[in-house]
Amino acid sequence: MNSPHVDAEVCTQLAALARLCLRDEEAVALAHDLDRIVAYVALLERVDVTRVSPFVGAVEKVPLRDDDVLGPMLAREDALRAAPAVRDGHVEVPKFKDA
């Protein structure tokens, strides 16, 4: 089975989908790297793994969340006093995203 060839045009299309801007020389370099990666994955697909047990993870699975437990809280006045900026009784944060 031949692996698909990754060229600079494919990299430019992928970059556009990811909303990235690549210069021509970057697209060529990335194409070379991705082409080697795809070829290696194609090589791995040829390996016979019929007698290999599925890998389920190297570490014991732990719950992703703990139960919510109410703990000690900071008094509102203390929190506002420690805030870098306060307006109308609330912590003021700089705008970070256009609406």
Image (cartoon, rainbow, N blue to C red):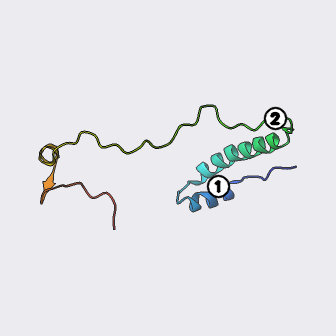
Residue most extreme to the bottom? 99
Vertical comparison of 42 with 7: above or below: above
Residue mark closest to the camera, 1 vs 2: 2
Q: Amino acid at mark 1?
A: Cys
Q: Residues within 10 Å of mark 2 (few under 14, many from 20)?
A: few
Dot 1 corresponds to which residue?
Answer: 11
Q: Helix, strand, or loop for circle 2?
A: loop
Q: Are the residues tagged 1 and 2 within 8 Å (C-beta)?
A: no
Quadrant of residue 15 within the rendered picture: bottom right
Disc 2 designates what residue?
Answer: 52
Q: Is residue 90 above or below residue 59?
A: below
Picture quarter with the C terminus:
bottom left
**Residue 56 spot, x, y in % from top left:** 68, 38
Q: Tell me which residue sits at (13%, 57%) in the image.
A: 89
Residue 61: quadrant of the picture:
top right
Q: Residue at x 72, y 52 (%)?
A: 6
* Residue found at x 16% / y 44%: 75
Question: Which label's residue is closer to the chain start, 1 or 2?
Answer: 1
In the image, what residue occupies the spot 43% across and 41% down?
66
As shown in the figure, which amino acid type bears the numbered disc 2? Val
**Where, by quadrant of the figure, is residue 81 drawn?**
top left
Residue 49 screen position, x and y as percent: 84, 38
Relative to residue 21, is residue 31 drawn left or right? right
Residue 32 sits above or below residue 18 on the image: above
Name the element at disc 1. helix
Which sits in the foreground, 99 or 33? 99
* Residue 94 place in picture, x, y as percent: 24, 55
| Dot 1 crowding, Cα within 10 Å, few <14, some 14–19, many 20+ | many
In this rendering, position of residue 36 left or right of residue 26: right
